[in-house]
Image (tube, grey):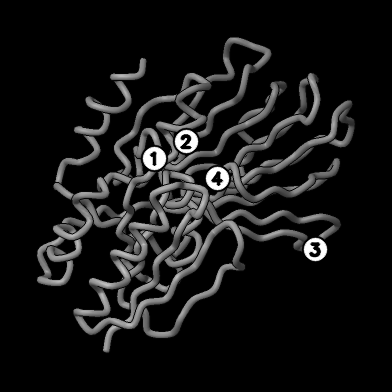
Amino acid sequence: MGKVLLIVNSAHERSHVLSNEIHSILQNFGFAVYILDRLHTEKTIIDDLELAISLGGDGTVLFAARTVAPASIPLLPVNLGKIGFIAAVAPEQWHDSFEQWRSGNAFFSYRLMLEVLVERDGKTVFQGTCLNDAVISAQSISMINLHLRIDGTELLSYRSDGLILATPTGSTAYSLSAGGPIVNPEVDALIINPICPFGLVNRSMIVPADRVLAVYVEHRQRSAILLTLDGQVTQQLEPDDCLFVQKTPYKVQLISTEQEAFYRAIHTKLLGIL
């Protein structure tokens, strides 16, 4: 008997009804179904899962990706949010998408993720992953000073409100609001995008995904600094901290309703709200 994990955002009104519906149908197919509420339960992985289904908005997909991607578990993202850019499967489409997966005919979108390490005094004090972005920002109205190296070569120094290190999936999130480019989510690339930089030469860059980025926090800072992953996981930074950012050895496997869902989402969801 196969095992399926439902990752639910219980804050959405429809999540309870839809999770019960999915639970009942999957049990009739012979699947053992487990439920994880992202708001009230610590992340956990059931052994030998065949599939994960997220019920919520894009935030739930980000949580689910960090949870299941390391175990190479495909993720069916059902949208209960307002926009649903990553969560591209409408509630009424979940059964069709599930049947496509069950028959081996599902469309998959393989998305790059980032691993972030924070070193302090030669020791690793934080380790995390993200699907959208890692953001280094001041916690007050003050500029911060950061130095960037790529594969050990010093590249730029930033005096700005912060720095966004985004995946192509995250290119349509905070990075886009900060003036960054839109990148197809299946492209293997990293986006480096300063937030309100002081200086016209500090603009966003796209580099190959196999590069290792190192960001050094300058010793003298007038503001406390925060690292945020996917807008959900935070870590306080200190002067002289060093962040190492690189792609994870795995990708999240998102089940989509169609091969070109990204371009349709650009047209119907992103351009429609601009």
Report helix, strand or loop for mark 1.
Answer: loop
- Report the label total: 4
Report helix, strand or loop for mark 2.
Answer: strand
For the residues carrying marks 3 and 1, which lies nearer the camera in this image?
1
Estimate the spatial distance between the alpha carbons at disc 3 and disc 1, rounded to whole Å. Answer: 30 Å
Which amino acid, mark 1?
Answer: Pro
Mark toward the start of the polypeptide (2 vs 4): 2
Which amino acid, mark 4?
Answer: Asp
Per the rendering, the mark at residue 123 is: 3
Judge by depth and name the residue closer to the eye, 205 or 259: 259
Mark toward the start of the polypeptide (3 vs 1): 3
Mark toward the start of the polypeptide (4 vs 3): 3
Estimate the spatial distance between the alpha carbons at disc 1 and disc 2, rounded to whole Å. Answer: 7 Å
Left or right placement of residue 252 versus residue 230 in this view: left
Per the rendering, the mark at residue 230 is: 4
Please give the name of the residue rendered at 54% of the width and 74% of the height, measured from the top-left corner: 44
Mark toward the start of the polypeptide (1 vs 2): 1
Q: Where on the picture, by quarter, is residue 58? A: top left
Q: Position of residue 247 (x, y in %)?
A: 48, 55
> Dot 2 corresponds to which residue?
191
> Dot 1 corresponds to which residue?
168
